[in-house]
Image (spheres, helix red, strand yellow):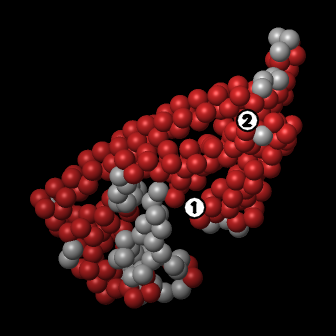
């Protein structure tokens, strides 16, 4: 998540000592990362797992490679577009909600500046600021209208001032979904041109898919901050469970229906 360059964070609790100084609290060069990393990771995970689940179910039901490929491609694009549109609408709703409260805070800082300054003073007093440091923090924050409004949104309303484009969010989701979701289908596509490869299509799809899922899991650590290998293993286990369930269901239904 993006941090505003003037974001003020508390690093010392009141019980651990005297009030922190303003210099120790102002994060001037906070880390910056793309607000769309989460969309990319989620899209890649859903694309790889759902597509492989469909492929596993169709293969378990005894369907030939051509049918598996058709079903998989149809699911890939239908699910990808659906996920992208859902992400677009969800992000759009978040931005409308955020903009509504931003306009309200802008109005209040203009019409009731003293009252809003007192709220800023209370916010930083709760963070441990006292005396001159507290007054200095209030003066710095309220001297810039944009920073003032963002501070009120973040610390009073608990709303992130970070702005995300609904179109870019949806496009990131769609791109990641299609790219990662294509991986389980590649062996079946190759088997259409190489008959000798058909027997290895499922096993190759398994290896390629779980390698991709593990990679997505390691990328997920960029968002969660967890160790990359733990995130990768966790994601692989989740994908394995979903895929195994899909394969077993397809296999059972195939036997029951005589396919």
Figure check: 112 above or below 258: below
**Pointer 2 with pointer 1, Cβ within 8 A:** no
Task: Return the residue at label 2.
Answer: 192
Query: Does residue 108 appear to the left or right of 253 in the view shown?
Result: left
Residue at the far top: name it: 257
Circle 2 Cα neighbour tier, 10 Å, few/some/many (<14 / 14–19 / ≥20): some
Q: Look at 68% across and 62% down and name the residue there.
A: 218
Q: Quadrant of residue 240?
A: top right
Query: Does residue 204 appear to the left or right of 27 in the view shown?
Result: right
Tag 1's secondary structure?
helix
Query: Does residue 48 appear to the left or right of 62 in the view shown?
Result: left
Q: CA distance from mark 2 to mark 1?
A: 39 Å
Q: Nearer the viewer, residue 235 or 167?
A: 167
Q: Nearer the viewer, residue 128 or 209?
A: 209
Task: Return the residue at label 1.
Answer: 223
Circle 1 Cα neighbour tier, 10 Å, few/some/many (<14 / 14–19 / ≥20): some
- Which percent across, then down, holds residue 190? 72, 42
Residue at the far left: name it: 111
Figure check: 204 above or below 140: above
Q: Quadrant of residue 147?
A: bottom left
Q: Nearer the viewer, residue 200 or 232?
A: 200
- Which percent across, then down, holds residue 114? 17, 67
- Which percent across, then down, holds residue 43? 56, 47
Q: Quadrant of residue 229?
A: bottom right
């Amino acid at each position: 998540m993006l941090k505003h360059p003037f974001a003020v964070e508390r690093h010392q609790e009141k019980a651990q000592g005297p009030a922190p100084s303003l210099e120790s609290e102002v994060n001037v060069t906070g880390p910056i990362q793309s607000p769309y990393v989460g969309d990319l990771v989620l899209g890649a995970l859903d694309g790889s797992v759902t597509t492989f689940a469909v492929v596993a179910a169709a293969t378990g039901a005894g369907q030939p490679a051509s049918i598996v490929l058709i079903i998989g491609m149809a699911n890939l694009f239908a699910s990808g577009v659906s996920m992208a549109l859902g992400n677009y609408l969800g992000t759009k709703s978040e931005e409308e909600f955020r903009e509504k409260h931003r306009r309200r805070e802008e109005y209040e800082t203009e019409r009731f500046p003293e009252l809003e300054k007192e709220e800023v003073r209370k916010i930083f007093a709760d963070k441990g600021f006292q005396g001159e440091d507290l007054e200095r923090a209030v003066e710095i924050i309220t001297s810039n209208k944009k920073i003032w409004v963002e501070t009120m949104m973040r610390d009073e309303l608990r709303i992130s001032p970070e702005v995300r484009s609904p179109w870019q969010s949806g496009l990131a989701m769609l791109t990641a979904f299609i790219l990662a979701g294509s991986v389980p289908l590649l062996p079946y596509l190759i088997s259409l041109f190489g008959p000798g490869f058909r027997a290895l299509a499922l096993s190759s799809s398994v290896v390629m898919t779980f390698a991709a899922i593990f990679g997505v899991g390691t990328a997920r650590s960029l968002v969660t901050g967890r160790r990359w290998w733990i995130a990768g293993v966790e994601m692989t286990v989740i994908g394995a469970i979903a895929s195994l369930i899909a394969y077993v269901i397809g296999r059972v239904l195939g036997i029951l229906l005589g396919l």
